[in-house]
Image (cartoon, helix red, strand yellow):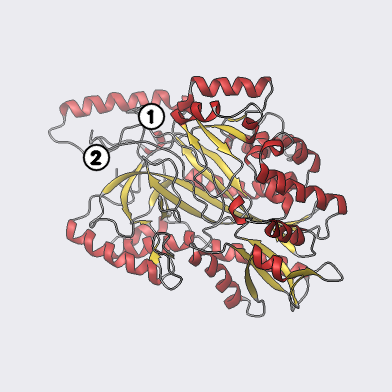
Amino acid sequence: MSNDENTPVLRGCIKLPLANDELLEVTSKAKDYAIMHGAAMRSKTAFSPDSLNFAPFVLVPSSFPRKEFEKAIALQPIINRLMHNVAHDEEFITTTLAETIKVDEFTANLFNIYRKVLAHGFTQRISLGMLRSDLMLESCCPELSPMLHHVENNMAASTATAAAPAPATTTTVAAATAGGGGDDDDDVAEANGKVDNVGIVRATKSAYCCWKQVEINTIASGFGHLGPASKTIQSFVLRELGHAEKLKHMPKNDALAGLCDGMVKAWDIYGKPESVILFIIEDISYNICDQRFHEFYIRETYPHIKVLRRTLTEVHREGKLGQRKELLLGTTEVAVIYFRAGYEPAHYPTQGEWDARYLMETSLAIKCPSIHYHLAGTKKVQQALAQPAVLERFINDPEEIKAVGKIFTGLYSLDDNDAGNANYEMALRTPEKFVLKPQREGGGNNVYGVDIPDALKRMTRVERSAWILMDLIHPPLSQGYMVRPGSEMPPQIVDMVSELGIFGVVIGDADTIVHNYQAGHMLRTKLSTANEGGVAAGLGALDSPYLIDSDGEEGYY
């Protein structure tokens, strides 16, 4: 990827570097604090059900512009309603996925379940959506060019006359986009960067122009616990470093409560006091703390509600429908099904798992997500939503249409038609501007930049329709200490990019929404040189936002 010395850096929460002895001591404390507060995962390289490693984390919170954070929070209920309406539009989903299901077997299998359920009518009209809208700041904006030019001129003048270098900033390109929901919710997008110590202050207002939508996750939107846990760790670190006054700039985060309360609201709607909430899980759950804390929150806060955990294989073996089409596991009736698995082909090793999914979809239980919500979260549907005038189909308010339309970055079809073929040629000419994304969740599936032409050339015209093309987002960089299990001590200052996820809960049927609210947030941060940054995959790190204003009153550069 080409470098561009205009890439801005968000000012930091505290002044770095820390003294070596202080850094060693606080990092050692923070590792133990993370494990003891549930910010932990099972190791993929040395798995044991009886042991945990702390989850990778950034030592102090990363800066995020307050105005853009508040905008994302305010917009989430509108996005919830948008996705709810999309999920209940049979014609739109069917038309949009028509070419994709011809070549993508996994999406075709999901769609086949959807088609069969439609043919027999939905047993349960209510759906529970627990969504996560993922976004990144965009710094490559035409309206910023004069401002950046002014800053660069000041830099040149300052560095020519300065007797000593000022604090380090990073001035490189960072181009990014991300994908992937799923339990790991892996993807923090691709970016490249390096530190070059040119030593000049940059105003926060030149570090971004807005945030752009990366994707909307509709299944297994993880980190409802690990998001708030990140704030807990970093708040501890700031207090240990003598910066307790900074805590007021870390926004409240009740994601775990907000999401679990959504499940309980759905359980209340179901109306059977002896029924349970069922978590659908993988055979091996590496991200165990994030899952279990959802379960434990429900059990502790609502002790009258029981939670069960089953794999798709176990549901196939134990599950059946009762006389009212209620889902029974043995003799236990299930009110709500929360999928933390089922979002990738590996979760369906045999036809039995697909049969289990169909059984659940035809049952009276309230699903999170229902099959139509799952399909609404595919990349192809989200690419279609970014097309002009499509939002008007699902949102009535002109101001809301305008607000949502502004957050989309370029999303392009690769179908075998005039538009798709033109987009294909565009990707071959300038691959460095794009990322290629399939209809998959869970991370690790995208193709970036210079690797795109070879990937596209290996596909037939029909196979291309299972993928979409997305503009790279160019995020500002931040600098900090990333702490990982087994990594060197003390940690080194590194360049990073972050992806913010806003949770939302929406409950209703095709005609009425009964609950719709924003439910907290999470921040994942990764090295600026990595393509994708899943925390559970070992590539990214837990983080939380430190809100800054454009007037420069908080933070350091």
Q: Position of residue 392 (x, y in %)?
A: 74, 35
**In this view, 22 is above or below 463:** below
Which quarter of the image is occupied by the C terminus?
Answer: top left
Q: Nearer the viewer, mark 1 or mark 2?
A: 1
Question: Residue under circle 1?
Answer: 1
What is the three-letter code of the residue carrying label 1? Met
Residue at the limit of the structure toward the front, as seen here? 350
Residue lying at 35% horizontally and 27% vertically, measured from the top left: 4
Mark 1 secondary-structure assignment: loop
| Label of residue 168 in the image | 2
Foreground residue among 151 and 323? 323
Q: Are marks 1 and 2 in contact (CB under 8 Å)?
A: no
Q: CA distance from mark 1 to mark 2?
A: 23 Å
Q: Residues within 10 Å of mark 2 (few under 14, many from 20)?
A: some
Residue at the limit of the structure toward the left, as seen here? 163
**In this view, 42 is above or below 92:** below
Mark 2 secondary-structure assignment: loop
What is the three-letter code of the residue carrying label 2? Ala
**In this view, 359 is above or below 168:** below
Residue lying at 56% horizontally and 64% vertically, measured from the top left: 283
Q: Position of residue 156 (x, y in %)?
A: 24, 25
Q: Position of residue 454 (x, y in %)?
A: 49, 27
Foreground residue among 541 and 200? 541
Foreground residue among 205 and 64? 64
Q: Position of residue 488 (x, y in %)?
A: 25, 56
Q: Is residue 29 left or right of residue 372?
A: left
**In this view, 330 is above or below 39:** below
- The quarter holding residue 386 reads top right
Residue lying at 38% horizontally and 65% vertically, measured from the top left: 53
**Precedes in sequence: disc 1 or disc 2:** 1
Which quarter of the image is occupied by the N terminus?
Answer: top left
